[in-house]
Image: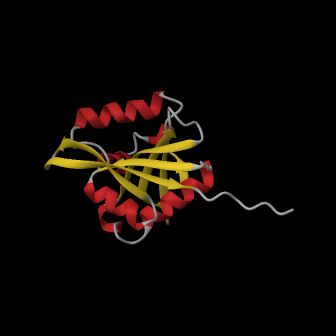
Amino acid sequence: MLELINDRLEEPELRELLSYAVFPDEDVLNAVIEQYRTEPELRLYGYLEEGVWIGVIGCAQDQEMPDALRVRHMAIAPDERGLGYGRGIILKLLAMEKPTMLMADADAEGAEFYRNIGFSVVSTGANAFGAEGTSEQFVCIFHAEEEETEE
């Protein structure tokens, strides 16, 4: 079950999941948590299965395209990776939010995940410095299928 968790980020399990999606620094994590608590346009969802938090996904309407949704953070518990939860969370988010387009910025590893679940992936031509050095950055785009209308 995917549920809004903006007001539950004091829970250690949710805080830990979100930490996997941000630069591994306590100050950065605290700043991101504060953003989700105080900025109403930011939504953070948690995926709960059989009483266990499996993953989180944070999103916001894109600044330049109001019908598009941008993934800001996404993380799956390390023991649950590779089992399809990431794809499932993306599908649930699409069903709940109903954007015409879903976008995400990613490093090479994240870009591969998005590519494998049907996103178009394009290099931004930029590099970012992270915990493991410099990595190429990508923008990942998924165009949601328009529902066919019956006449």
Give the quadrant of residue 113: bottom left
Give the residue drawn at x 29%, y 43%: 22
Is 48 left or right of 18, judged from the image as shown?
Answer: right
Image coordinates for residue 93, horizontal then vertical, percent:
55, 54
From the viewer's side, name the closer residue of 127 and 84. Answer: 127
Q: Is residue 23 left or right of residue 59?
A: left
- Reply above or below: 60 against 136: above
Q: Which quadrant is the N terminus positioned in?
A: bottom right
Q: Please determine whether, in this image, residue 55 is positioned above or below residue 31.
A: below
Classify 52 as above or below 46.
below
Residue 144 lies left or right of residue 105; in this view the side is right
Q: Quadrant of the C terminus?
A: bottom right
Residue 85 in view of the camera: yes
User: Residue placed farthest to the left in the image?
Assistant: 133
- 51 vs 67, nearest the viewer: 67
The residue at 50%/55% (across/down) is 142
Residue 90 locus on image (x, y percent): 49, 58
* Residue 1 in sight here: no
Q: Which residue is at the far bottom?
A: 83
In percent of width and height, residue 38 lies at: 47, 27
* Quarter of the rendering containing residue 149: bottom right
